[in-house]
Image (spheres, helix red, strand yellow):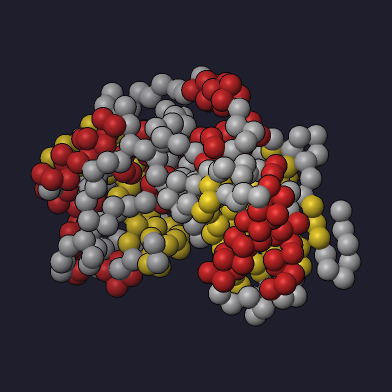
Amino acid sequence: MYFYGLIIVKIKEVNNLYKMVAKTFFGFEEILANELRNLGAQKVQIGNRMVSFYGDTGFMYKANLCLRTALKILKPITSKKLRNEKDLYNFIQSIRWEEYLDVDDSFAIYTTVNSTIFTHSQFVSLKSKDAIVDKFRKETGKRPSVDTEYPDLIINIHIQQDLCTVSLDSSGGSLHHRGYRTATNIAPINEVLAAGLLLLSGWDGRSDFLDPMCGSGTIAIEAAMIACNIPANLNRKEFAFEKWLDWDLGLFEKIEEACLSKTRDFHHSIIGCDKAPSAIRKAKQNVENANLTDFVKIKDGNFFESIKEGEQPLHILFNPPYGERLELDDEAFYSQVGDTLKQSYPGTNAWFITSNLEGLKHVGLRPSRKIKVFNGKLESRLVKYEMYAGSKKAKFQKNT
């Protein structure tokens, strides 16, 4: 419904389908969109660090359970153009919060702003909180409480210039919290980042896989989950939607069962190696937590002293140590990476991520691909090196 002057948009369900927004990292938007299409989402549209789509409640459950490159799934409920803080208060108070929140429940509000009208997200959160509790107090004589630790409802407010969108956060904590990683090293790679890098590299589970600097094992674990088509968040303890008033346990269990029925066999090897005994212990624990000991083997080993096992095609992806994790001689380290790949890993597609763009110059190999990504706030590159069995010229001549 639209009212001009002040514009109010009530986001309605059509045939039980409603709009949702999946948040992701820069550079992962297309991958996330493909994931959504493969799951059955409708009206998929790519934005900046997000993808919007339509689905029903069951699909919302499935998206949270299965998406590998999503950080959060938001359900927008309404939006409005605002002129000032009074408009904000009245707008938030006009929402039928009783449809989403009981007076005895708790809630939390998280706000992002990009506006010249509203410049402080904390102010917007406090003003919105006042509007909600005042509404309940006026109508019931009681008010819901605010709980930023374990709220029953998480409200997301996004203001872009004068447009305010109110959404419900169906995920809760970021979806990179898979539930399997209890042991970590210094600066472990984010699980969503690991899954996204694997998908960008084309990993599909049809060859052997190696992470030669595996740390706490995240990349190897995510590689196994992709190879076996195991839902990304199967091991997660809780989603925010489990506290919603319309939570349907029976429906969720049906969705979970249907997703598990689509897992597949894997007939290759996935190996994670590290030279640090502490990393080996942690990686093994995390693999066990993920129930993947049948698929992922963690071994003690120094990549620079290793050779490829067997003659089958090999897919390598790793996250080399960098300044915050380990003091390195950049030139020597990256030169060793290149020498090891060239001398010891024929028939290999080797990928790694680095924020050390100077270090890349010392690999001594020409990358066949470079993809801009971010590791946290660090601008990085995901690079690919194709290591042929024999020279590249001989490979070309054989194929022609």
Image position, residue 287 (x, y; %): 27, 33
Tell me what residue is drawn at x 24 percent, y 47 percent.
184
Tell me: 192 left or right of 302. right
Q: Quadrant of residue 279?
A: top left
Image position, residue 32 (x, y; %): 56, 47
Closer to the camera, 285 or 223? 285
Tell me: 188 left or right of 230. left
Image position, residue 292 (x, y; %): 31, 28
Image position, residue 60 (x, y; %): 61, 37
How many tags in the picture? 0
Closer to the camera, 326 or 82? 82
Tell me what residue is drawn at x 32 percent, y 62 percent.
354
Q: Quadrant of residue 35?
A: top right
Tell me: 284 left or right of 374. left
Q: Is residue 26 among the parts visible in the rendering? A: yes
Single out the residue that lies furthest toward the bottom. Answer: 116
Q: Quadrant of residue 81?
A: bottom right
Single out the residue that lies furthest toward the front. Answer: 141
Tell me what residue is drawn at x 73 percent, y 53 percent.
95
Q: Is residue 397 among the parts visible in the rendering? A: no
Tell me what residue is drawn at x 16 percent, y 66 percent.
328
